[in-house]
Image: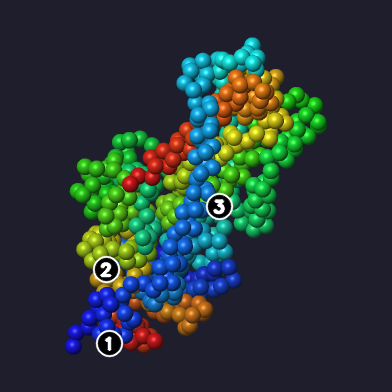
Amino acid sequence: MTTDTRVGSTSPGPVLPALGNPSRSRTIRDQVARVVMWLAFLVAVVPLVWILWTVVSHGGHLLMESQWWTNSQRGITSRRAGGGAVHAIQGTLIQAAVTALIAVPIAVMTAIYLVEYGRGKFAKAVSFMVDILTGIPSIVAALFIYAVWVTTFGFQRVGFAVSLALVLLMIPVVVRSTEEMLKLVPNELREASYALGVPKWKTIAKVVLPTAFSGIVTGILLGLARVMGETAPLLILGPYTKSIATNLFSGYMPTLPTMINQDRTELGQPAAVERMWGAALTLILLILLLNIAGRLVARFGSVKK
Amino acid sequence: MAKRIDVSDLNVYYGQFKAVEGVTMTVEPRSVTAFIGPSGCGKSTFLRTLNRMHEVIPGGRVEGKVLLDDQDLYASDVDPVAVRRTIGMVFQRPNPFPTMSIYDNVAAGLRLNGVKGRKKLDEVVEKSLRGANLWNEVKDRLNKPGAGLSGGQQQRLCIARAIAVEPQVLLMDEPCSALDPISTLAIEDLINDLKSQYTIVIVTHNMQQAARVSDRTAFFNLAATGKPGKLVEIDDTHRIFNNPSVKATEDYISGRFG
């Protein structure tokens, strides 16, 4: 006796139900699920494309002009077109660099402590603090630094104060990402190193960190990309100015977010509005570059294959 | 170079849990001692106490004495890092350092302990790779990553890395369990070569392997899960496999266990 498994077969006998078309209700459920998922995807993507399109179409042409990358806004009133964003780009990059310089060593060492050494109550407390720090809104971090820097110590609002506030925001991000990368390093590598008579600190420095290096750098760059777009600390601690200012400890320091905010307040002036879009696009590009750099480091990491 | 190990009345703990109880044995120099026994009986745990790797695990501690020639490894003035420099270890799964080349992997133990000088390192790397029967296969690609070798080659690389620091004793924790039969044979040949210079202790689940490579065999067993593992007996391998003095050993070896 042969078992006919063709579609629509009427031959009796097989234990399995007929291997014909899926039932009608299953087809419908399949179609509904498909449509819902496509809609969800569109809802997520449409605003993103829309934003990018708006920013590029309004501000793109400014970035094509060489003066955008060489000039500041010094002496250019909001009515006039022209000038560039180099003062704001410089400010953003300097503040980001100083932030990274302070935050990265603290964050990486905290992560090393938590993964390699931390046991018991103190480590749990540190980990809990990092969690809390992660949840702090950026405006609260900014107000805290304001309270310390300006109210308590009586200093001026300068670029360095902005960096301090950004440090508070960057540390938890980098601690968490570095922790994850260190945990990914197989314990067998640590043991292999111990078994060669290598002390623990050297094992961490020469075996664990190099193995996790690309992941740690990626995390740092992504964390940096995140704090570079922060605006609250800038509004509170880093007022805008139209001239190039590179001194972190004296005078106001312009940045891209504050440039956007400044030109936003002049909505009646078409030239200012264009500059706002241009600065926004520049900021997006900078962050995109950092993201790409992060991914490149991850791809060409130190682990040899 | 090779040294004798004397263990007396050793208890091994994970926190409050006693994993191995009351081990007393002697490991002879320039010979191969095999540890056999069912899973979970504490062979590997005990092996790791011989170079103080056990205490790397949180909560890991021991009671009792381990003498290397006449030096107590657990005396309060002994540095565990120095112990591990003297007693090397090869692990179950090959674990070359993924960021390092073949050359750097072999040189790692010396470099990380502060030895410099290209000439000295070149010498040690070649000698160790020859010692591990790997030199001919890798001499033209010493700068290629160690993780790119086959499993069996990686394990021999790890052995080369371990012997590069010239330990007195070499501990091997199931070194062939992740390898195919041909690589296993290569490692067993290597163990045979190495025993003229080193004291070797090997944990294995493969009883034929214990019979092939070892001079003396120790059988570990545990009464029940949750109970500590114990050393049942240790004797010449020939006797353990042909005429053991304890019935449990015979049952285990002949497959009539449990």
Q: A265 or B242, which is in the foreground? A: A265
The answer to whether dots 2 and 1 both sit on one chain is: no
Calculate the distance from the C-alpha at mark 1 to the C-alpha at mark 3: 64 Å
Question: Which amino acid is tagged 2?
Answer: Val
The amino acid type, in three-letter code, at marker 3 is Val
What residue do we see at 36% from left, 85% from top? Answer: B257
> Residue at position x 32%, y 64% from top?
B178
* Residue that label 1 marks: A12
State which tag comes first along the sequence, 1 or 3: 1
Image-quadrant location for residue B43: bottom left
Instruction: Name the residue carrying label 2.
Output: B213
- Say above or below: B141 vs B133: above
Viewer-proximal residue, B168 or A238?
A238
The residue where tag 3 is placed is A115
Answer with left or right where residue B218 lies relative to residue B64: left
Both on one chain, marks 3 and 2? no
- Could you tell me which secondary element the residue under label 1 belongs to? loop
Question: Where in the figure is residue B222, as x and y percent of width and height?
Answer: 45, 80
